[in-house]
Structure formats: structure tokens, C-alpha cells
Amino acid sequence: MNAPLHSGLEHWLSAPDDSPAPDWLLEHRRAARARLSAQPLPHSKQEAWRYTNLKGLLEQDFTAIEEPLSALQPEDLDTVLIPGFDAHRVVLVNGRFAPELSTLGELPAGARIGGLRDWLDHDPESLRGRLDAARGESGAFFALLNTAGLDDGLVVWLARGVMLDRPLELIHLSVGLDEPRVAQPRHLVHLEAGAQATLVERYVSLGESLYCTNAVMEVVLERDAVLKHERLQMESRNAFHLTGFYLVQDENSRYAGVNIGLGARWARTDLNTRFRGKQAECVLQGLYLAGDGQLLDYHLDVEHTVPNCRSEENFKGLLTGQGRAVFDGRVLVSKDAQKSDAAMSNRNLMLSEQAEIDTKPQLEIYADDVKCSHGTTVGQIEPEMLFYLRSRGIDAVQARRMLCLGFAGEIIDRLSDEAVREHVAEAVGQRLA
């Protein structure tokens, strides 16, 4: 018998399992559910949840999506596609893989990309022991909830030395339903030794409906593997969003991540990185823009557990109206991680007196031969800079917009494709206008 879950969350797991599941997966779900039932809901007395209140999320009474996929046609995607962006495309509609909307084309030999449900139907043993391998023993509440309700998602597996010829675009498309619904997609990305890929992950919606996304992505980079990963969260302003991201890196692997947060009413993103091999590098960049009625929350946990690895975290925030943001970053350097190089920075531009930012970068160092730094700034637009632009005939609104785009440009420029950069810059500019 399943142990009872916390009130309000039982319905998150009520989706029927209409595809056969291997015994090991059923047991994995049951174990996750048991762990959930044995621990309390996250609350403000826990350090990781000090600044983030769950009340608004739990009041919505979300239920799991049980309906079949909406009868969308490829042309229905036109409003959410990025003009000029050439990529392999995978589309999930309300958390379910939609092959009729996806355009993978011809993939190189050794590249396997497909829906998690299909993978479990046809080759379940290849995933045995892979789920939660990157997440490890982390007891993160909503990641456990995702495992307990695991339904569908994306699997990307690149064999040794395989390089994707074009970026892979993963579109999470949410379509309004008659009741508040929750989708819990689960993604596995595994790059074997020397494999390389660019993944552009986008969260978008048709309309401004109320829904929740609780996603988990696990990434494993074997020796010399390289992954560029860009996450664009631009959901409905009525949406709730949770992401648990877990990255494991082997020797000499490279990960470059860019996180853009513009949408959702309430969004929390947990980024977790663990070095498993020497000479690995992880760079995490981020830009968030919170306006009236929005909370955007980023938590970073980077673990240097082996020597000679490098990490860089650089996040910037723009806060307008009564917008609120949280940045909570932690870098752990264990006693065996000599010659680690770690730098963490969080800078915020406050565009109103009512905006709020809680920022807490942290270093926890147990080694004695390291190069580590961290810092944070919170400020407003410099009057002298605004005066300079106004004195040249630029009106106040346009001048502020130009200065804000200049501030954000450092992060936007890290996006690898020009079409994606233009898309994000335009979205930021519209919000600032």
C-alpha cells in the first residue's frame, strides 16, 4: 500500500500509467514515494527554503494531466518558434513527447534521441540504474515528487565521439486545460567520452493559463565530453515552475550553461553540479527579470570533490515594479579538491523601490591550495549615465531600456546562436518597455 502524501500533493501523482513499466521502475517510484511521505514539506526554517514560500503553489490544487495530447498541428507552433533558428526539435506538450510535432531529421550514427515513454517501452534495461544516478542521494523534495510521478520526458544518448551537427531544441509547450494541471517531465542526457552537443531548452505556453511544471533533468558527461546547454524559461505569467537540474562531470569534460528566466508567476530553479574527474570545467551563466507579481528563485550547488577543476557562476538580475528574486549559490571545495578554481558573482539592478532581492553567494572551502572568490552587488541605474543619454536627446524610458539591455547583454551574448540571442534580447526589451 502506498504511504499517504502531504495534503495537496497526492493528486500530482494521479496520472494513469497506460504503458507497461518494468518492475525496477515501479519499485523506484515506490521508493521515492516512501521517502516523500517520511519527510516534511519544505518550509522557511530550512536554509534552502528560507526566502521561498510554498503557500501560493499549494493553494492551486494542481492535478496530474490525464488527458491525451491536444490535437495540435505543426503550424500551431508558429507563434512560439524562434525565426531563423535551425535545429533538431523535440516537442513535449503538457509534459508528453509529441513525435508529430518534433523534427529530428537524420541524426548521426550513434545518436539516440527520443521520448522517455517510448524508450521504456522498447529498451527499458538500458535505463536501469540511470534514473537518479546523477541526482544521487539528494533528498530534494520536488525531485522526489517527479520520480514518484515519472511519466514522460526526453532521453538523449550520444555514443563515444559523436557530435550533433545542429543544436537540439527541446520545447516544453504548455496548453491551457480546464483545470489547474501539473506536468512532471523527466529528462536524461548522457554524453559518452568525447561526444559533443548543444541543447536549447525552452519553456513556453500557448496563452496565459494557470499550470505547473515540475521538471527534472539529469546530465552525465563522460571524459572529454562537451555540452552547451541553454535554458529559456518564458512561461505564462500565471504559471508555476520548478526545475531540478543535476550534472555529473568526468575528467576533462566541459559544460557551459546559460539560464534565462523571464516568465512564470512563481519559479524555482535548482542547479546542482558535481565534479567526478580532474580537469573538468563548468560555467553557469544566468539572467532573470522579475516584475509585478513574480518570484524568480535560483539555487546553485557546485561540488568540487576532485583536484584541478574549474567552475564559474555569473548571474544577473533585473527587478521592476514589485518583482522579487532569490539567488542562493554555494560552492563546496572538499579537502581532496586541491588547485580548484571557483568564482561566483551575482549582480542585481533594482528598477523600483518596491522590488526585492535576497542574495546569498557562499564558499565552503576545506582545501588549502585553491583560487576562489565570490561577491554580490545590488544597485540602481547611475544618474550620471541616465543624464548622459538624456542630454543627447534620448527620452527617459528609452535611456533606461538601453542601460538595462547593456547590463543584461553580457549574459545574452553567451547564447550560442544569433537567432536565439535576438529572440531573448527582444523579449527582455519588451518587458522593460
Image (cartoon, grey):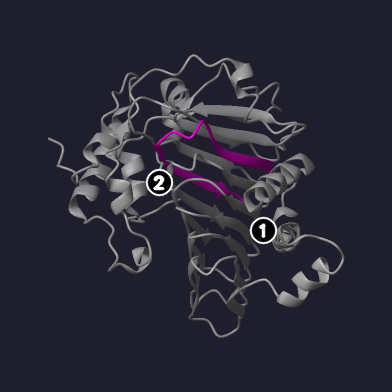
The residue at 63%/77% (across/down) is: 339
- The picture places residue 375, in percent across and down from the top left corner, at 59, 77
Q: Is residue 113 above or below residue 248?
A: above
> Foreground residue, 340 or 46?
46
Q: Which residues are magenta?
A: 195-222
Upstream in sequence: badge 1 or badge 2: 2
Asked if one can make out residue 404 in the rendered structure from this viewpoint, the answer is yes
Q: Is residue 114 above or below residue 136?
A: above
Q: Which mark is residue 362?
A: none
Q: Residue furthest right?
A: 392
Classified by dominant secondary structure, the portion drawn in magenta counts as strand
- Please give the residue where the numbered disc 2 appears in the rendered image: 132
Q: Secondary structure at mark 2?
A: loop
The residue at 72%/38% (across/down) is: 163
- The picture places residue 371, in percent across and down from the top left corner, at 63, 80
Amino acid type, callout 1: Asn
> Foreground residue, 5 or 334?
5
> Foreground residue, 315 or 310?
315
Q: Nearer the viewer, mark 1 or mark 2?
A: 2
Q: Is residue 212 magenta?
A: yes
The alpha-carbon separation of the residues under discs 1 and 2 comes to: 23 Å
- Please give the residue where the numbered disc 1 appears in the rendered image: 252
Q: Which quadrant of the rendered structure holds the N terminus? A: top left
Q: Quadrant of residue 79?
A: top right
The residue at 65%/22% (across/down) is: 103
- The picture places residue 114, in percent across and down from the top left corner, at 54, 26
Position of 175 compared to 160: left or right?
left
